[in-house]
Amino acid sequence: MSLYEKIVSGEEKIALVGLGYVGMPIAVAFAKKVKVIGYDLNSEKIRLYKDGIDPTNEVGNEVIKNTKVEFTSDESRLREAKFHIVAVPTPVNSDHTPDLSPVEGASRILGRNLTKGSIVVFESTVYPGVTEDVCVPILEAESGLKCGVDFKIGYSPERINPGDKVHRLETITKIVSGMDAETLDEVAHVYELVVEAGVHRAESIKVAEAAKVIENSQRDINIAFMNELSIIFDKMGIDTLEVLKAAGTKWNFLNFRPGLVGGHCIGVDPYYLTYKAEQLGYHSQIILSGRRINDDMGKYVAESVVKKLISADLPVKGAKVAILGFTFKENCPDTRNTKVIDIYNELGEYGIVPIVVDDTADASEAKRLYGIEFKTMADVKDMDAVILAVAHDNLKGISKDTMDSLYNPNNKSRILADIKGILNKSEYTDTDYIYWRL
Ligand SMILES: NC(=O)c1ccc[n+]([C@@H]2O[C@H](COP(=O)([O-])OP(=O)(O)OC[C@H]3O[C@@H](n4cnc5c(N)ncnc54)[C@H](O)[C@@H]3O)[C@@H](O)[C@H]2O)c1
C-alpha cells in the first residue's frame, strides 16, 4: 500500500508544521478528508484554535470550531504522522538577507520526531536549494535517518492570497515536486485530495522553489514599473490610472496598478532570489531596482501630502492628518510588513502625528509592533488631510458626505490622498478638494 493509500484509509496521518495564514487553510482542507495533526510552536495560537478562534480570518471561527484538525503544541505528536507539510515563515533580516531560522527550527523539531517511511513537504517560499541543501541536512542530523532511504522530501509552494475568497487553496493549481518519481507521485496524489484545480508536477524540487519565487518577483517588478510611471506622470500633471485605463485597451497590456508593496511575500521573496544570485556572483539589476522603487513609495506618498499641505497654505508641522487603512493589503487583518507605517513615520519627520483608523486590522498586533493605537471614524474630525491607504471594502463604500464631514470646516481646501484610487475621482474634482492618487 502506498503512503497515499494509507492516509486515505486512515491508517496514517498528515501533520502540518506551522499553522498561520498558509498552514491553517491546508490543515482544515485535509481534515475534511483524512486525519490531520496541526502543530504550531506558538502555544497561545494553539489555545485560540482550540477555543474556535481564527485570528487570521482566513477560514473563520465557525470552520475552526468544526474542524477535525487535532491541534497541538506538543512536538512529540508529530511522530503520529508520516506525511509532513511545513508552512513556517520565511522573512528577511534588516539587511534584506533571508532569515531561514524558522525553516531551520521547524526542520530541527520535525527531525527530532521523524519516523521511517515519512515524506516531508516544504511549502514555505524559499530560494532554489533551501529544501535540499539547508533542510535535509538538519532533518538527517536530528533524526539519524537518511534522506532518500529512510524518508523522502518534496516541495510544494503555496499560492494563496490572504483575504481573497475566490483564489483559494482548492481553486489554485498547486505546483508539486518530489526528490524522485515515486515521491512526486505520492505528493501529487495527496494534494489532489484537496486541490480541485489539480496539480502541476514540476521537474524537480529546485524548479518548484524557483517557480514560486519568480511569481512574486514578477509581480513586484511590474508594480515597481507602475510606481515609476506614477512618479513621472505626477510631474507631468497626468493621472496615471487614466493612462493605464487607456493603455489597458490593448490586448497585451498588463493589468497592474501603482501602490504600496508590503506583506511577507511580494516585498520579501525577491530578496531570496537576489541573495542566492549574489552568492553565485550575479548582482541583480532589474529585481533590486524594482525593490528600491517599491520600498520608497511610502516616503513618496508622505512627501506628496506635505507638498499638498504647502500648496494649500496649511501649516505642515502639527497638521491634522488621518490615515484610513493600515494593513498590508485590503480586507485582511495582517499589519506585519505594512508599508503604511512608512507613510506614518515619514509624516512624523515633518512634525505630523497622523491618527490611524482601521476596523479590519488586528489592533493588538499594530499596538505591539508599531506602538500605534487605532482610533475610530468618530475621532476623524477637523482634518487638514485624509489618506485612504488601503482598499478595504468598507473604505471603498465611503460616501462624499462622510468624506466632507472629516475635514476642518474652516479650511479653504481639503487634501485627499486616495492612494489606490478607490473613490470616484469626478466627485472630488472641481470642488474644494485637492484630490491626489498614485
Ligand atoms: N501569507 C501568504 O499569503 C502566503 C502565500 C504564499 C506563500 N506564503 C509563504 O508561506 C510561508 C508561511 O507564511 P504564513 O503567512 O502562513 O506565515 P504565518 O506567520 O502566518 O504562520 C507561520 C506559523 O508558523 C509558526 N512557526 C514558526 N516557527 C515554527 C516552528 N519552528 N515550528 C512550528 N511552527 C512554527 C508560527 O507560530 C506561525 O503560526 C512563508 O514562507 C510565506 O512566504 C505565504
Image (tube, helix red, strand yellow):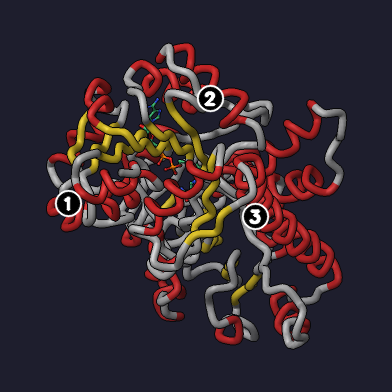
Placement of 322 over or under 417, stated as above or below: above
Ligand 1's image quarter is top left
Of 25 and 343, nearer the camera is 25
Q: Which mark is residue 135?
A: 2
User: Disc 1 marks which residue?
Assistant: 67
User: Disc 3 marks which residue?
Assistant: 215
Q: Of the residues under marks 2 and 1, which one precedes in the sequence?
A: 1
Q: Looking at this rendering, what residue extends furthest in the front direction?
A: 1
Q: Is mark 1 within 8 Å of ligand 1?
A: no
Please give the name of the residue rendered at 53% of the width and 25% of the height, measured from the top-left corner. Answer: 135
Question: What type is the residue that disc 1 sits on?
Answer: Thr
Question: What type is the residue that disc 2 sits on?
Answer: Cys
Q: Of the residues under marks 3 and 1, which one precedes in the sequence?
A: 1
Residue 44 horizontal/vertical position (percent): 23, 30
> Does the image show residue 144?
yes
> Does the image show residue 338?
no
Residue 240 horizontal/vertical position (percent): 74, 73
Residue 335 horizontal/vertical position (percent): 44, 45
Question: What type is the residue that disc 3 sits on?
Answer: Glu
The quarter of the picture where the C terminus appears is bottom right
Please give the name of the residue rendered at 27% of the width and 45% of the height, measured from the top-left corner. Answer: 7
Residue 326 horizontal/vertical position (percent): 46, 52
Q: Of the residues under marks 2 and 3, which one precedes in the sequence?
A: 2
**SS class, disc 1:** loop
Please give the name of the residue rendered at 41% of the width and 72% of the height, measured from the top-left corner. Answer: 405
Disc 2 versus disc 3: distance between alpha carbons? Answer: 23 Å
Disc 2 versus disc 1: distance between alpha carbons? Answer: 30 Å
**SS class, disc 2:** helix
